[in-house]
Amino acid sequence: MVTPLRLILSTLTLAGTNVIPTHDPFGHEIIITDAEINGFKELDGYFESIAKNIDADNDGALDVLSNKQMYIISSFAIRAGTYGVDSKPAVINDSAINTINYSSWINGDMGFTTPSKGSMSGPEGDPYDSIRCGYIQSFDNNGHGFTIGFIIGNNAPFKKGIYDMTLDDKKYTLSFSNIDAKYNLVFVTPTLHTNSDGKLTSISLTYQHSDYTTVNPENILIDVMIQLNDSVNYQFYNSPWINRTGGCLGGTTFNCVEGLSSLTMNTPVDISTLKHIDIVYHDILGNLYFIQWRR
């Protein structure tokens, strides 16, 4: 028999944004660490910021009603180590978790016309000297929807707060709360498998922490993409999005395949010019990770 939550917590009292129970089981019946509490606090701030962004254009109407809802995600870029090839194992650098570069991306739904320019300032009360717009892309080939990326000078995490964004001279107000990369960081570790000609036939993936302990990816991430790059950063191979079911999320038209543990090439791929591999994944909150592996 399952005991109802209201009986566990007894009477609940709202104090500001906090709900106080007369019977608090945390720390007694339910043991929770300080690290877990801090993680929940960050998650609480993240969802609070999402709730505040329901009318980013400040016209008094819910943005979702006109298919113009905006979603803010964080992007993390990490130089992880060296990829594996056949019997040679991959190696995670000791300094990998200390080399994280941060940026923030805003996704706009399909009711938007893709903007040609964008800028951002903030946060209120403690603004950055400069926030650089580094990326704008349409969601389709007809100029609908968008993804726009912003970076501060030292690639540090964006501060929590209220930001002003301008897209093609129209102003928006956005609340942002960053989630630390460490909570959903996993080293998606590739090993390349080649044929007798040295061409790539398949890639196996393992999911690890920096100490090589394995992780169940389904508890952390939604999907994975593999990108092969040469010495001038030309991507000569992009995999489909790889996930547990093979279905694409949200009705997107991207190519998606099933299987988080391996990918088999349709035809062998020449990797003689391969310089580095980018493993890209969305975590369960939609944040984006770029895990780079070098020769």
Image: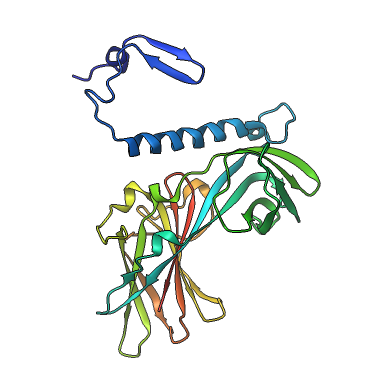
Task: Reply above or below: 59 against 287.
Answer: above
| Residue 113, x across and y down, in percent | 73, 49
| Residue 190, x across and y down, in percent | 35, 69
Query: Toward which corner of the image does residue 187 lie, by quadrant?
Result: bottom left
**Left or right: where does residue 242 sit relative to residue 54?**
left
Q: Residue furthest bottom?
A: 197
Q: Quadrant of the N terminus?
A: top left
Residue 139 in sight from this viewpoint? no
Give the total of numbered labels.
0
Q: Nearer the viewer, residue 179 or 95?
A: 95
| Residue 262, x across and y down, in percent | 32, 66
**Left or right: where does residue 175 sit relative to residue 45?**
right
Task: Reply above or below: 83 against 73.
Answer: below
Q: Residue furthest right?
A: 169
Q: Residue at x 31, y 10 (%)?
A: 10
| Residue 101, x across and y down, in percent | 52, 59
Q: Residue at x 35, y 78 (%)?
A: 201
Residue 79 in sight from this viewpoint? yes
Q: Quadrant of the C terminus?
A: bottom left
Q: Residue at x 63, y 58 (%)?
A: 153
Q: Nearer the viewer, residue 112 or 35?
A: 35
Q: Residue furthest top?
A: 11
Q: Nearer the viewer, residue 223 or 15?
A: 15
- The way the protein has been coloured in the rendering is rainbow
Q: Residue at x 45, y 81 (%)?
A: 274
**Left or right: where does residue 125 sit relative to residue 116?**
left
